[in-house]
């Protein structure tokens, strides 16, 4: 069972501006994981620059570790947001992807 995302966010994480996605595609379900019936979830942390570009994408936790990591990092690295209202970047934003029965859900 995936963790509650709210419990993974600290009081100073990703605070200061509202994020409005311009482009935020979900990761593809890896074909190899699908063919083997693998399911799991991945928590990804990332920063957002003042101009809305994603930076410093990193894995925070994954179960199982491995089959969904690369697809999750790639997806988040490609995200774009509207320029931030405050003109300052955001740090340690968190997203959880759930890979289940061939589908990917955002939590």
Image (cartoon, grey):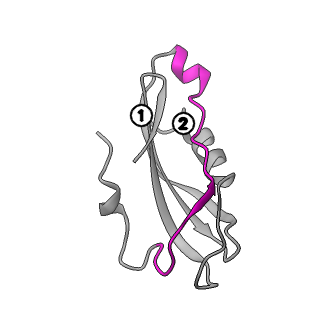
38 within the magenta span:
no
Q: Position of residue 35 (x, y in %)?
A: 54, 14
Label 2 neighbour load within 10 Å: few <14, some 14-19, many 20+: many
The answer to whether residue 21 is above or below residue 105 is below
In the rendered structure, find residue 56 and report the number of the disc placed on it: none
The answer to whether residue 16 is above or below residue 14 is below
Instruction: Kindly indicate the quadrant of the structure image that contains residue 28.
Output: top right
What secondary structure do most residues of the magenta stretch adopt? loop
Label 1 neighbour load within 10 Å: few <14, some 14-19, many 20+: many
The answer to whether residue 31 is above or below residue 84 is above
Instruction: Kindly indicate the quadrant of the structure image that contains residue 106.
Output: top left
Q: Is residue 35 left or right of residue 22?
A: left
Which region of the structure is painted magenta? 14-35
The answer to whether residue 38 is above or below residue 60 is above
Q: Are marks 1 and 2 in contact (CB under 8 Å)?
A: yes
Q: Position of residue 102 (x, y in %)?
A: 48, 23
**What's the distance in space between the residues labelled 1 and 2, CA to CA?**
8 Å
Query: In this figure, which residue is indicated by the disc labeled 1?
Result: 40
Q: Is residue 16 left or right of residue 25?
A: left
Query: In this figure, which residue is indicated by the disc labeled 2?
Result: 68
């Amino acid at each position: 069972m995936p963790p509650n995302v709210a419990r993974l966010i600290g009081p100073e994480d990703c605070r200061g501006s509202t994020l409005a996605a311009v482009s935020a595609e979900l990761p593809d379900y890896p074909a190899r994981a699908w063919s083997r019936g693998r399911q799991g979830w991945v928590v990804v942390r990332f920063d957002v620059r003042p101009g809305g570009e994603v930076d410093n994408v990193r894995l925070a936790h994954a179960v199982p570790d491995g089959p969904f990591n690369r697809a999750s990092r790639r997806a988040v690295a490609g995200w774009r947001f509207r320029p931030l209202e405050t003109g300052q970047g955001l740090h340690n934003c968190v997203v959880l992807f759930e890979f289940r029965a061939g589908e990917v859900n955002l939590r």
